[in-house]
Image (cartoon, rainbow, N blue to C red):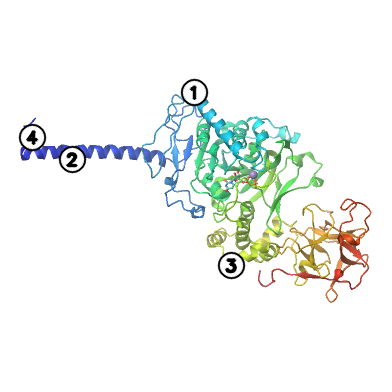
Amino acid sequence: MRLLLGGGRGGRMLCLWLMLLGFALLTLALLEIFNRDRDESREKPGPPRRRRPPHQTPSSPDLLEVIVDSQDPAIEFAADIAPLKSLQEDQLLYVPSKQEALKKGGYRVLLLGAKRDARATAPPTHGGMEEALRLQMEVLEKDLELSAAAHKDGFNEVVSERIPMHRRLPEARHPECFKQQYESLPSASVIICFHNEAWSTLLRTAHSVLDTAPEQYLQEVLLVDDLSEHGHLKRVLSEYVSQLDGVRLIRSTKRLGVAGCRAVGAARAAGEVLVFMDSHCECQRGWLEPLLQRVAQDRTRAVSPILDVIDGQTFQYNATQWPVRGVFDWRLDFRWDSDPSHQDKDPSSAVQAVRSPALGGEVLAINRHFFQRVGAYDQGMLLWGEEQIELSIRVWSCGGSMEVVPCSRVAHLVRRHHQPYSFPDQEVRQRNKIRIADTWMNEYRKIFYRRDTLAYFIRQSENPDIADRLRLKRSLACKDFHWYLKTVYPQLYIPEDRPALSGELYNVGASSCANYPHRQELQGGAMNTAPCSGTGSQHCELNSEFEVRWGPTGASCFDTRGERVVLSPCPTNRSTTSRLQWRFMKMSGQLIHQRSQLCLEAVMEEELPQVSPRGIGGNAGGLFLRPCSHHPRQRWHFDQLVAPRDA
Ligand code: UDP
Ligand code: MN
């Protein structure tokens, strides 16, 4: 020993050599491990595959994906993710299933920027499943305890938990739908984004897709967790998902919002068609094929099923009346417009897709390439709201189309009040609407700003950064909003908003404004007066047809029922009647009803005879027709909140 290692210069050299050799070997080994991890994480989504591949290799990286890295500066904001470019591969990490002999369960998490020695969980056992379920129950119970009521998410979570995970919805499709044939359709990736979704609704959504979508067309289900905070959406969900074939979970470490989250899903999807779906849906049998067929026939078509309704209290399924179209108003609020009176008696029309000016985001199918080419989702859209309107205007204006496909039905949970999340920025929706107005509406944006004065005032002090979107609009040679209104959405009345004849209708005697105390879409109700809101919600106009048009669509007109002034649907064919015509006397401020020649008066409740208890006999104060006088309560003026030249 002493001869080999011991004293002397030669021995020390040998010792040094051995140490160097050892160090080199160690470095090589570490590099090897590092590269292996990286190769796994860099693997791109493979070619289209069947949902249940018969020979899945144990290392196949497609069961569970996680983005885990809170320190990565590359993922700063959702807005940083360019819409047309796929995500940097190192922002995402696969978590391959450690399947052994195709047993289910088991996954490992690769932490980027943290230790690379990702540890696989023990191979799945029956006990493992029980443990996962026990954990799930514990977390659920804790969540329920924590919630002050079972309604914390705007729906009855207790009822939802009693509904089976795999429930079959009552048939609602038209009999003609069963005669339809579907062949060689493209594959679909169903992308389900969620933020703080309840366990039962989220998993029922995923199972419902798996239960109803034909295997050969379902590429994958991508669950994208938009930085949820609820405990049940963490480890327990990862465990659960790792046991579902064809379902992958992607987690974001930044709150992305609907548009950002869907863009992440889209960037990772391998299916030919993307189907974006809310995290609280249940699919009717046969929902996917009609959608895929319409998109296969024309790649520039974005399509939606009929959205049936799951009641937030009872979880009862309610079928929606056909025909239904997606529309929006001048406040840029979206709604589904169902008009059964337009129902065609011809049975073949029951299966025909209906062109729709816009589509809601609940469920939307779109060709993956077309989606990316047309600019994906606007990544400047904050958290939630109106991203579906932006996409709709863009798809139509830039060469695509939209339609509702009646043989496809998906039920969507309608919550009582709103989201199970709050917004750090209360003006999120206004900011999103500003982006739409400034990017897409040209001079028509003034009509919007007059009806949403909060947006107007925000816009006065902030410039939205829409340069990229304007560039996109130019490069795609998109048509302008005038074209959109004339060609795609001619049903939307275009207000004239003439100076001094539009704005809040202010009553001098009552020092308050004309007001509609019912839901805007509920026509036939009586008008009254209320404190002026200043928000644009009481905006109306006297147009050149002498109609007083009310509401954000401008489709409601001042009408009379006896001596009361009520709202009625305005004529759509421009042949208005004298019953709906008014003349405004600028000098006296009188608004004179043409047919009766009586004047509009704000009548106080106490002035009316008390024939029955308040409210029931309809004798509450309001707007009435009265013989003309110079009483201040017959004196009106239109208060413009936004000067015409400013908007
Ligand atoms: N969502 C999200 N991130 C958000 C807000 C919403 O991923 O910041 C998800 C949400 O969980 C749901 C979908 O986006 O699956 C649409 O939101 P929501 O259902 O609340 O909208 P609504 O249907 O009420 O219009
Ligand atoms: Mn929803």
Residue at mark 2: 20
Q: Position of residue 242 (x, y in %)?
A: 50, 32
- Residue 362 visible in the picture: no
Q: Secondary structure at mark 3?
A: helix
Residue at mark 1: 127
Q: Earlier in the sequence, mark 3 or mark 4?
A: 4
| Mark 1 crowdedness (10 Å alpha carbons): few <14, some 14-19, many ≥20 | few
Cβ atoms at labels 2 and 4 below 8 Å apart: no
| Pick the front one: 137 or 487 | 137
Residue 461, numbered label: 3
Q: For the residues marked 2 and 4, what is the alpha-carbon distance in whole angstroms? A: 18 Å
Q: Earlier in the sequence, mark 4 or mark 1?
A: 4
Tell me: residue 563, above or below residue 590: above
Tell me: residue 283, above or below residue 101: below
Q: Is mark 2 within 8 Å of ligand 1?
A: no
Q: Amino acid at mark 4?
A: Gly
Q: Amino acid at mark 1?
A: Gly
Q: Secondary structure at mark 1?
A: helix
Q: Secondary structure at mark 2?
A: helix
Which is more foreground, mark 2 or mark 4? Answer: 4
Q: Earlier in the sequence, mark 1 or mark 2?
A: 2
Q: Quadrant of the C terminus?
A: bottom right
Residue 6, numbered label: 4
Q: Amino acid at mark 3?
A: Ser
| Mark 3 crowdedness (10 Å alpha carbons): few <14, some 14-19, many ≥20 | few
Q: Residue at x 54, y 47 (%)?
A: 261
